[in-house]
Image (tube, grey):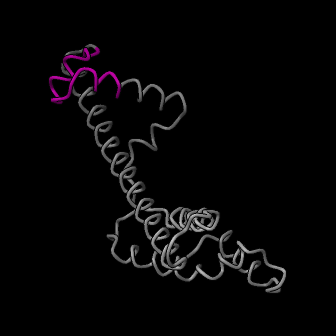
Amino acid sequence: MDLHKSIREFLRELQSRAPNSRSDNERLFLRYNEFILSSIAYYKNMASKDCRIDWDDVYQDAAVALLEVAKDPDIRGNFSTYIQREIINSIRRSVETESQFRNFVTRLRLELVLLIKYVRELHSKLRREPTTSEVAKGLGLSPICIAQLKRLCRAANDYEMMDYLTEWPN
């Protein structure tokens, strides 16, 4: 797995310390780091080529889950099995959340592009600014949805983010 520079530097610095100068959490982290990396690699291999998940974020979520589990005094059963299960669950949650967010952004971009294109077409046809209900009828969306998209367009223009929202990612 290709890790972000800061994560690589952290691991390098942590491994360079003498074993007796490491904290319990640092030793635990080093012990399970390879498991985290191999588990993420498994999910990364299953992901499609156009998947745009930030794997560094997934890695960090898994590392946080590991340290959270280590603080839990009520662990019953095999500690190693429990930690591995929690790491896997954290990775699954993180991948699912990232995927849902990416799907939402993709859908939002599509709706914005369609809205802008249709409003321009309708404007040139009617020679006036189309109403929300006219746009909604033409696109097959509710007037509330069109109003929300228009508000988003205004906000994106205010923050100079319209290009980001309406261009398709590579």
Q: x, y (%) of residue 143? A: 24, 20
Q: Nearer the viewer, residue 4 or 59?
A: 59
Position of residue 113 relative to residue 47, above or below, is above
Task: Say whether residue 114 is left or right of residue 152.
Answer: left
In magenta segment, residue 48: no
Tell me how many marks there are: 0
Q: Nearer the viewer, residue 61 or 89?
A: 89
Position of residue 125 relative to residue 98, above or below, is above
Task: Say whether residue 65 is left or right of residue 6.
Answer: left
Q: x, y (%) of residue 116? A: 31, 32
Residue in the picture at 44% in, 70% down: 88
Residue in the picture at 40% in, 64% down: 92
Q: What range is drawn magenta here?
A: 129-149
Q: Nearer the viewer, residue 65 or 168?
A: 65
Residue in the picture at 37% in, 78% down: 45
Position of residue 91 relative to residue 139, above or below, is below
Position of residue 108 relative to residue 32, above or below, is above
In magenta segment, residue 144: yes
Q: The C terminus lies in which quarter of the figure?
A: bottom left
Judged by its main secondary structure, the magenta piece is helix
Task: Say whether residue 13 is left or right of residue 124.
Answer: right
Q: x, y (%) of residue 28? A: 66, 77
Q: Nearer the viewer, residue 81 or 112?
A: 81
- Among the 4 quarters of the image, the one containing residue 51: bottom left
Q: x, y (%) of residue 78? A: 51, 79
- Among the 4 quarters of the image, the one containing residue 16: bottom right
